[in-house]
Image (cartoon, rainbow, N blue to C red):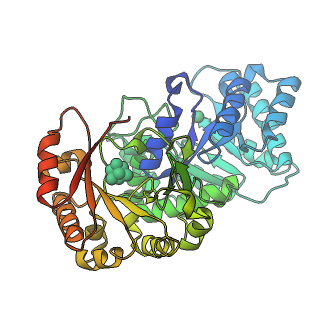
Amino acid sequence: MLIDTHAHLDDPRFAGEIEPLLARARVFGVNRIITIGTDLSTSREAIELTREYPDDLAAVVGLSPFDADLYDGDYAQALESLAQQPEVVAWGEIGLEYHHDCAPHEVQKNVFLDQLRRARRLGLPVIIHDRDAHEDILSCLRQAEDFPAYREPPYGVMHCFSGDLEVAKQAVELGYLISIAGVVTFKNARDYQEIVRHLPLENLLVETDSPYLTPHPHRGKRNEPSFVRFTARKVAELQGVELTELARVTTANARRLFNLPQNEGHGGEIAYPLNGNLYLNLTSRCNNNCTFCVRHSKLGLGGYRLWLDQEPTAEELITAIGDPSRYAEVVFCGFGEPLLRPATVIAVAGWLREQGATVRIDTNGSAHRTLELPVGELVKLLQPVVNRLSVSLNAADAESYKKLCRPREGEAAFEAVKEFVQTAVKAGIPVTCTAVALPELDINAIETLANSWGADFQARSYKS
Ligand code: SF4
Ligand SMILES: [Zn+2]
């Protein structure tokens, strides 16, 4: 899991596109995005967006040095009252911009210092913009040490860090973290990469600065939070750690800095009624990445939010189900692949069957391959606890399957689906194979294949 610690989602280039953008971020493991204001109106928008997507976003409010001229007592007061909203996790972005012609340096410094003082008083960390102003930034941060503070370090982050190792060292000593943006992925950023190699991992964050600073290989296009993975990958390589370790450490750093909630609850529904059935949501993980998957564009279905931050236990699912006799069928689906959690499926399904419920599992049929479970063993455990299986087949041959469903197991996945269906049919479990009715698919060929394996067939309508 990654956190994009700096994005401007209020930008007009994202208008009307926030949900697909957040869904794409989730697909790539980006679970939280810090959206940053640069003046009063964008700060308000950051808060409003966070209210709409509280599980995915957190807001930051402040006045950037680009508009330092706007700052006066009233402006500061207005920002301060925004800063006290519950959605707000930091004050920013604030700082000094000496590259472009903005307000005079003295004005910028005063505005920066005043916001530093207010942030400290409110116990908020700050997000610092530093362009060609390293010395003055550090001297302001030293002055801020004398302001009354209601907060332990870290006091903030040097966003889109552009200084050298010495600047980084001093910022860290003063209690600030260092955030790396997409510039580190550029081929001509050798010197900068050399610096990033030596930064202390426990003080690092990653960010996109979306819609700006798009990392390689998408340089030139609009940036978005899901691209933070390219930056994270490069930083991991430079630091000589696995991507998972980099993600774990930078996420912990970001949580510490922003006091982010420690995943209370699941982040989405784990049991939800729809069309007379009850659907159980076990996981947001999947061993496929189908081109048509609804998860690329939506955070849920049927008005329910389904991306999970935390997977439910069998006990939690049983509590959420309540009385299963109210539903025609109880369906294991997940906004992901339920059989990636076979033990939980079997425990809950067993309980459901004892209650007399009709149980179905919607699956892609290849989880056993990913988990390296013998297919016969899995089917033997499923046989007594399910009434039927629905397997999304989607193709009549391995190559088309690989193209359409982009399975983690490559070409072996299609073979795994086949052995799963055939083994289940042999064990006496009724199986329906399904295919999304995409215009380019030969639905008849898929139906013929499914029937030859002893399964029924059903085409599903394509919902984008
Ligand atoms: S198998 Fe289902 S959940 Fe997984 S990627 Fe494909 S459509 Fe999405
Ligand atoms: Zn920014």
Which one is in front, 216 or 282?
Answer: 282
Q: Can residue 132 be seen in this view?
A: no
Q: In this view, does 49 lie above or below 383?
A: above
Please state the horizontal and vertical placement of residue 265, each as a whole percent of the image: 64, 60
Please state the horizontal and vertical placement of residue 34, each as a whole percent of the image: 61, 43
| Quadrant of res 331 | bottom left
Q: Which quarter of the rendered picture does the C terminus lie within?
A: top left
Which one is in front, 25 or 222?
Answer: 25
Q: Is residue 137 left or right of residue 86?
A: left
> Ligand 2 quadrant?
top right
Q: Is residue 117 left or right of residue 311?
A: right
Q: In this view, does 208 lie above or below 14?
A: below
Residue drawn at x 80%, y 46% is 144
Please state the horizontal and vertical placement of residue 308, each as a whole percent of the image: 53, 55
Q: Can residue 98 be seen in this view?
A: yes
| Quadrant of res 256 | bottom right
Q: Is residue 313 left or right of residue 85?
A: left
Residue drawn at x 14%, y 61% is 453
Residue drawn at x 49%, y 45% is 275
Please state the horizontal and vertical placement of residue 397, each as a whole percent of the image: 12, 51
Q: In this view, does 391 lie above or below 353?
A: above
Residue drawn at x 48%, y 31% is 212
